[in-house]
Amino acid sequence: MFKNAVALVTGGASGLGRATVERFAKSGGRVVLCDLGTSKGQDVSKELGSNVVFVPVDVTSEGDVTKALGVAKEKFGRLDVAVNCAGTAVAFKTFNFNKKVAHKLEDFARVLTVNTVGTFNVIRLSAGLMGENEPNADGQRGVIVNTASVAAYDGQIGQAAYSASKGAVYYCV
């Protein structure tokens, strides 16, 4: 199923993203591992072999995502799968009465931007490259997988930003 498939995986240096990269690579797929330049992406790609290439990517940057897609096309000839695992979170109550301080709006906005806008950025740009593929027997040219969280509909205390962002991915994107 994954053999010879070309995948782009965001958040690929750790957690669910890394597990996805490993699964593709061990199944004969080729992967563009996307994560922040400060991540362990380079180490992970070296560990997994020549079918995995690391590209430093901030998912909110059109230029970074476009560069990663260019690497997919140049090195592997196409893109079949995009998996969005990149994300961030903060843990802070909407208002902390003990400290008499409100959740920082810029932290809330940053989580929404990375988790929701970043996911959409990868979707919209990946779809363009997948559109160049010849349709398979079912008329499909590729697939995009977005990861959300149970927090999308059952958030915990301190997860207002994370829950809102994952709810947006789960319900809207």
Image: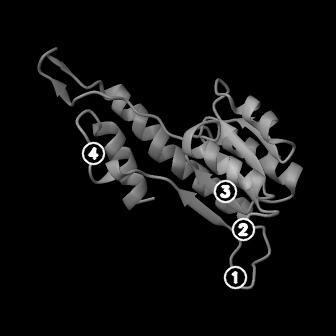
Residue at the far bottom: name it.
137
Q: Is residue 94 left or right of residue 114?
A: left
Judging from the image, the colouring scheme is one colour
Proximity of marks 2 and 3: CB atoms separated by less than 8 Å: no
- Pointer 3 or 4: first along the chain: 3
Residue at the far left: name it.
97
* Residue 65, position as x, y percentages in the image: 67, 43
Compared to residue 25, the image places residue 140 above or below, namely below
- Pointer 2 or 4: first along the chain: 2
**Picture quadrant of residue 100:** top left
Instruction: Please state which amino acid type lies under the numbered disc 2.
Output: Gly
Instruction: Please state which amino acid type lies under the numbered disc 1.
Output: Gly
| Tag 1 residue | 139
* Mark 2 to mark 3 CA distance (whole Å): 9 Å
* Mark 1 to mark 2 CA distance (whole Å): 11 Å
Q: Secondary structure at mark 3?
A: helix
In what quadrant of the picture does the N terminus appear?
bottom right
Few, some or many C-alpha atoms within 10 Å of disc 2 (few <14, some 14-19, many ≥20)? some
* Residue 149, position as x, y percentages in the image: 40, 50
* Mark 3 to mark 1 CA distance (whole Å): 17 Å
Instruction: Please state which amino acid type lies under the numbered disc 4.
Output: Gly
| Tag 4 residue | 155
Q: Secondary structure at mark 1?
A: loop
